[in-house]
Image (tube, grey):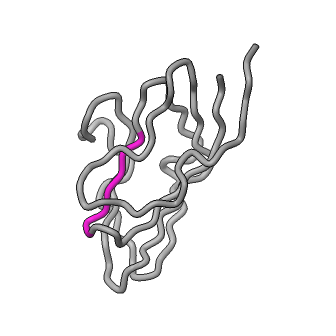
Amino acid sequence: MTTITMVQIVAPEQLSNSDAKVYTVPTQTTAKIGRAVFCNTSASAVTITAGITTGTALGAATTLISARTLAPGETYVSPELAGTVLPAGSLLRAYASAATAVTFTASGLIVQ
């Protein structure tokens, strides 16, 4: 029997300044991102990069947001990630140009 659950896929967390996984889709599970939010909590402009991969790093073919600038205090709701379906084993990866400057959270559906 298939179970669909609304969940907070990524609890609010500070992004690092290097490519890092922020969520891994569990085995025998599919995830769908409903909303992904990036908030620059610093006093300086920063860039964000994010994407979905099955490998260990983002590449040109797997990057969905590439060095998008966020002004100080700006909150960005990502249309690039919204609605994206991630199969089992996929990784949601993200980073900012400055460590601890951007808070990220995502919510959506999990199908098991």
Residue drawn at point x = 51 percent, y = 72 percent: 75
Report the front residue among 6 and 47. 6
Provide the residue span drawn in magenta.
Answer: 92-98
Residue 90: x %, y % from top left: 42, 30
Report the front residue among 34 and 24. 24
In the rendered view, tell whether residue 102 sits above or below residue 109. below
Q: Left or right? Give the position of 107 relative to 70.
A: right
Report the front residue among 36 and 20. 20
In the rendered view, tell whether residue 27 sits above or below residue 102. above
Residue drawn at point x = 36 percent, y = 60 percent: 15
Residue 103: x %, y % from top left: 45, 66
Quarter of the image where the C terminus is located: top right
Residue 99 is drawn in which quadrant? bottom left
Residue 20: x %, y % from top left: 30, 47
Residue drawn at point x = 28 percent, y = 30 percent: 55
- Residue 56 is a magenta residue: no
Quarter of the image where the N terminus is located: top right
Residue 7: x %, y % from top left: 66, 44
Dominant secondary structure of the magenta stretch?
strand
Q: Left or right? Give the position of 78 relative to 22.
A: right
In the rendered view, tell whether residue 57 sits above or below residue 49. above
Residue drawn at point x = 59 percent, y = 41 percent: 83
Q: Left or right? Give the position of 61 relative to 73.
A: left
